[in-house]
Amino acid sequence: MAHQAVQELIGLLPDGVVITGPDEIEKYREDFAHDGSAGTPIAVVRAESAEQVQQTVRWAAEHRVPVVPRGAGTGLSGGSSAVDGGITLCLERMRGVEIDPACQVAIVEPGALNVEVKRAAAEHGLWYPPDPSSYEICSIGGNLATNAGGLCCVKYGVTTDYVLGIDVVLADGTQVSLGGKRIKDVAGLSLLKLFVGSEGTLGVITKAILRLVPAQTVGATVVSSFPSMTAASRAVVAIRTLLRPAMLELMDNPSIRAVEEWRSHGLDGAAGALLIAQSDAPDAACAAEVELMRRCCEEAGATEAFTTTDPTEAELFVSARRNAFHALETRGSVLFEDVGVPVPLLPDLVDGVAAIAARCEVEIAVVAHAGDGNTHPVIVYDGTDPACVDRARKAFEEVMALAISLGGTITGEHGVGRAKKGALPDQLGEEVMALTRRVKDALDPDGLLNPGAVL
Amino acid sequence: MAHQAVQELIGLLPDGVVITGPDEIEKYREDFAHDGSAGTPIAVVRAESAEQVQQTVRWAAEHRVPVVPRGAGTGLSGGSSAVDGGITLCLERMRGVEIDPACQVAIVEPGALNVEVKRAAAEHGLWYPPDPSSYEICSIGGNLATNAGGLCCVKYGVTTDYVLGIDVVLADGTQVSLGGKRIKDVAGLSLLKLFVGSEGTLGVITKAILRLVPAQTVGATVVSSFPSMTAASRAVVAIRTLLRPAMLELMDNPSIRAVEEWRSHGLDGAAGALLIAQSDAPDAACAAEVELMRRCCEEAGATEAFTTTDPTEAELFVSARRNAFHALETRGSVLFEDVGVPVPLLPDLVDGVAAIAARCEVEIAVVAHAGDGNTHPVIVYDGTDPACVDRARKAFEEVMALAISLGGTITGEHGVGRAKKGALPDQLGEEVMALTRRVKDALDPDGLLNPGAVL
């Protein structure tokens, strides 16, 4: 039965679009979360056009086959883990990027990488701000699915703030266009915003119109060393009450050491924490912001505060921060957290995470988009030792519970996917879960779109 | 039957909350659109608390009584026009505003005026940017319902960009909390964003957590006179490709004259169009922005470009722009448009509107949040002359059709309400209308929330 349906799908689409060989589909089973939930799809569709996406979803609706949409597979929550008996609908071949400089928008297919949009925009002196650390390898489709954030979001906002329009294929295969090149539009419900961040559970986005802004010029970068994460996070709180820096990123000592051991970036391996702050204010305003940030750092106990206006030197520190996940992955098995709290509670969060690490006897390295109160505690553990795995899982749950208890969130930018869905009801409560279910059922009554993710 | 139900409602709530006297309820029948659709409610509930809102909505669900939520009643699309046999649920008494300066948020009840939030924030050196022209008299609840914009949105975005959390009473009387004081949160569907802009059709917002930013300092205001709207709108397009001004507002000659006749603001009544541009960039960057804007205006044919750094002088021009609606209302009956197009098509839109005015033999004055491509053609006509009324209605429809034909929207910030719902399917198309209906039905299966608005 399933075999017959797959044969029909293969016949519907051009040669090579549908793949079914076990070796070929293996790399489409998991995303970067390796959350252990991944099944084996009956086929992987590497769609080349919106029309092929529609044909695939129509076929899936007819045969009641689950569809897992997938971008570049760099997700950190298992949002694109394959499901047994389903298909994985991969958008990696739909890579078109077109810039409309007059309207200051990019018209982008979902498989285009974030960096490709940035590069295309830059050719016209324009900038697409959202910048996940994985911006060089993650796709816009995945960014839209998770409402991705990044390093510049503290000043420039997240993905949803830049989406003016989308084409989306609904569960029954209908394609609709929402929004457009106009900047303001309140005609009808905000359906566009509902699809952004829906992690492939409501539809498959086949095109996006993204707002661009004038290119950014970073003026100065301040790198401060602190004896502890507590001290550094107090500096963050102080800075955020005074100004909106263009970047405010935090690394703890285990992250610093992991990055340095993986590849030297010239960081101080003895520092308890490192805070990387940037100003893109012009001229004297930049100097004023730098001065304020330095003073906040010194008053919070920074042992050193180093300022550079050299973009190459700055990029060394920023790339150290971006490389932290990768460096930590080389040290063992990892569980990625993405918890966020109101900014003033950042010190409570980092202290609480340290307590959980001690109690559960696991190493938890912390990097953070600190200016947004969004932290990434990364639990590093020995995946071959069952007792260690249990302790790591326990710590993973406790960090999410801690964030919720501080009025925070279990995920600031990675999405719930499959890795965090157990904790979602704890954050949202029964009534919001029921409301979520009503919206999901209205848009995907047969539950075929990314089943097992989020809900 | 209805009488008995109303008696029950009166008994449920404290004295004075429910009013039913014909004279008393008269002022709650219409909003500023005076769209002619307003019926007579069986009661008006002036709720004092979220609990009373819940009690009222639960009662309405039980008795299947339609509920029209209402803020300050300053809407321009008939979104809070009363319906026969329904109740109007007015939030004007729920005026609480609390500032959390550490988290940089305002916790606001829906009846609080926009200006009250701005003032409370300013006491802490903070700023709530969204600024509809009616900011001194419109409520935050209404702003949330329509996803209101304003003058500073060209640089600072619209209401939805500042909403971190809401409490909302659903159609069955359940109250849910969405979001919170954390800045980034992608846990679950973006339900929060779905409620913003839903014009009271999905729930009644009883509290909002609004993001604040450091107070703005306007550096300079450039006021330029043009021989025509076409020339001025070309200057707008040029400016928007070079920078993001803090304000970019346009008035045509009929608007200028109407304002001057109503109350002199010192505007040049002979100018074909007036463009008011502001920069809030610091120091030399401000001077550079001013220079760029002046040059764009001169190259587009400005006959004069006057710059001031005096806030009082600047406010005179800005208030002239804000007062345009009010001044035009004194000249006859009015129909308010709110159409938007991609910015480069602004000249086409203003030329098209002029052609419609000529063809339909009506006066159409145009003011615009020009930097966003969002214009307000105001049709001024003799409401006592049936032929004139017909021509005005025809022009109203034609302006919306023009915007749609240019890839634009029938409403950029006022909402669809009842006045524009006839044109909504023309913009969205059948499939998006069906999708909208599915979401509406999932959240309000009995269709009791603001029936007749939007859909």
Image: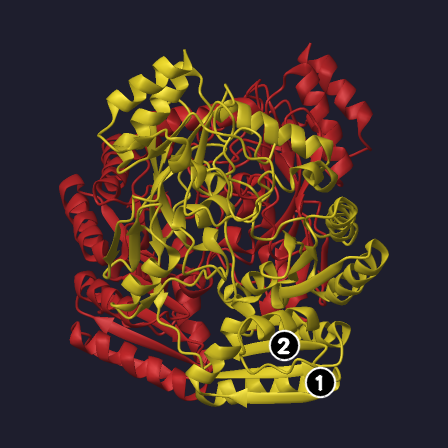
Chain colours: A yellow, B red
Tally the numbered discs.
2
On the image, the x and y values in percent for residue B445 come to 57, 19
State the residue in front, B104 or B398: B104
On the image, the x and y values in percent for residue A42 come to 43, 25
State the residue in front, B14 or B221: B221
On the image, the x and y values in percent for residue A342 come to 70, 59
* N-term-proximal mark, 2 vs 1: 2
Q: Quadrant of residue A282?
A: bottom left
Q: Which chain contains the residue that carries disc 2? A: A
Q: Is residue A420 above or below residue B1?
A: below
Which three-letter amino acid code belongs to the residue tagged 2?
Leu
Q: Is residue B410 above or below residue A56?
A: below
Quadrant placement of the C terminus of chain A = top right
B438 lies left or right of B374: right
> Would you say residue B108 is visible in this rendering?
yes
State the residue in front, B399 or B242: B242
The residue positioned 54% from the left and 61% from the top of the image is A326
B148 lies left or right of B185: left
The residue positioned 25% from the left and 57% from the top of the image is A99
Mark 2 element type: strand
Say whether marks 2 and 1 touch (CB < 8 Å). Answer: yes
**Label number found at residue A275:** 2
- Residue wearing tag 1: A302
Which three-letter amino acid code belongs to the residue tagged 1?
Ala
